[in-house]
Image (spheres, rainbow, N blue to C red):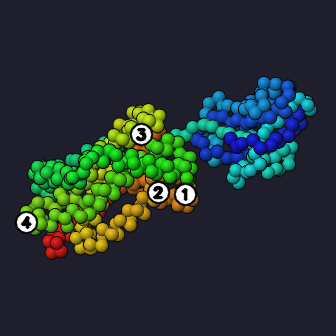
Amino acid sequence: MPTAETVTVELTQGSVVEQTFKVKIQRLMDVSVQWGTYYRPNSGTATMELYNLLDGSLVMSQSFPVAEIPEGGITTLSAPSPIETVFDVPLLLRITSDSQLGSAATPLMSLSTQTDDFSLSMNGQPVEGTLCLAVSGEDYVWTGLHYWEFAFGLAVFLILVVFIVWYRFRHGKRSYVVGAIIAVKKYRFLIRQLVSRDFKTKYKRSVLGMFWSFLNPLLTMAVQYVVFSNLFRFDIPYFQAYLIIGIVFFNFFTESTNMALGSIVGNAGLITKVYMPKYIYPLTRVMSSMVNMLISLIPLLMVILISGLVPTKAYLLVPFVLICLLIFCLGVGLLLAAFMVFFRDTQFLWGVLSMIWMYLSAIFYPVSILPKNLIWILDVNPIYNFVLFARTCMIDGISPEPVLYVRCFLMAMGSLVIGAIVFRKTQDRFVLYL
């Protein structure tokens, strides 16, 4: 509701105030208007009517005793049941009264016009401004209404994939999925040793040791919170939680990809002497970073609780996005590790690209500050989609829209497929450049 800046007209018998507008609400429930009374007792009846301008039909109507409206009070025109036929439809709110001069109230208004869809008239004369008007209702997601159909389709798809993999394996046909699983199982001891080595090396001779995995996101959040909440004054609900979720997810992305980037070059001595699948080296680096991230989830949950948020069942969905993020980082890590062998400048270019990526992922600023023609950048940004998924679960306490599940899954698998193809095509030449 716009802030009241002045009055419209004293709404006596024969006077009329009309406001046209559009709503982006799928199920309209209420339309509210704020009133001024001149700080006096008034009498009569005020009537609010809402019309659909496309067909001229009366959507809803309600009358209110003027004597019961206080100064700055609000009257609400409520629908008996949610109205689903007025989404993005031009509407007209007409306000009339049978009050007499000296005992009539007046609708309040703001002097600014919100959008081109809003127009205000008094007694048939157009005026600049907007009624102090608020519209409420609820939205629904079409895919959410068909949840079980989508869940059944996904289950059938997964069963079909498993069956195809099993069928190819049983008939002696080469399967990269089965081959990767067998290789990981065969070298699981070495994988554990490499993950342990990377984790211990990171904190070697450190006084606080692994406590830095706990402390680092808190310190980063504290600095960015002071800067962006006070200097730039972003009005984001639960900004501490909003910020630390973005920090933890993006820190894992940068750490895991940076470690994977040098995994082949850094293990050149081992690769040239001992045979093992080369993809295990970037895999162990990403898994080592995942251990750090799991530790970072502890301060993340602490900040969420301190912010006043209460965990909901939606938190059970967070593992899905963590797995998608892990797969995505593995795909990027495979790609960078292969490039690094042939182009050592990759490490410097990636430092610049990852910084740009951070600023394009809405880690510390609201999406609303971006121009509408740049919103598409966030839609195609995998990290933003992963962070948005986690924020929706942890801050809003609800499940994201189904389209976000699909985006996260496809972006993760797309990264893995591209990274695996490039890595596999180039791995036989690694020894020539090490």
What's under tag 1, amino acid-wise? Leu
Of marks 4 and 2, which one's residue comes earlier in the chain? Answer: 4
| Front position among marks 4 and 1 | 4
What's under tag 4, amino acid-wise? Lys
| Front position among marks 3 and 4 | 3
| Contact flag, marks 3 and 4 (Cβ < 8 Å) | no
Q: Which residue does the numbered mark 2 point to in the structure image?
A: 378
Of marks 3 and 2, which one's residue comes earlier in the chain? Answer: 3
- Residue at 33% x, 69% y is 348
In the rendered image, residue 364, in percent from the top left (x then y), is placed at: 47, 52
| Front position among marks 1 and 3 | 3
Cα distance between the residues tagged 4 and 1 = 52 Å
- For residue 419, the mark is none
Q: Which residue does the numbered mark 4 point to in the structure image?
A: 273
Q: Which residue does the numbered mark 1 point to in the structure image?
A: 370
- Residue at 75% x, 41% y is 4
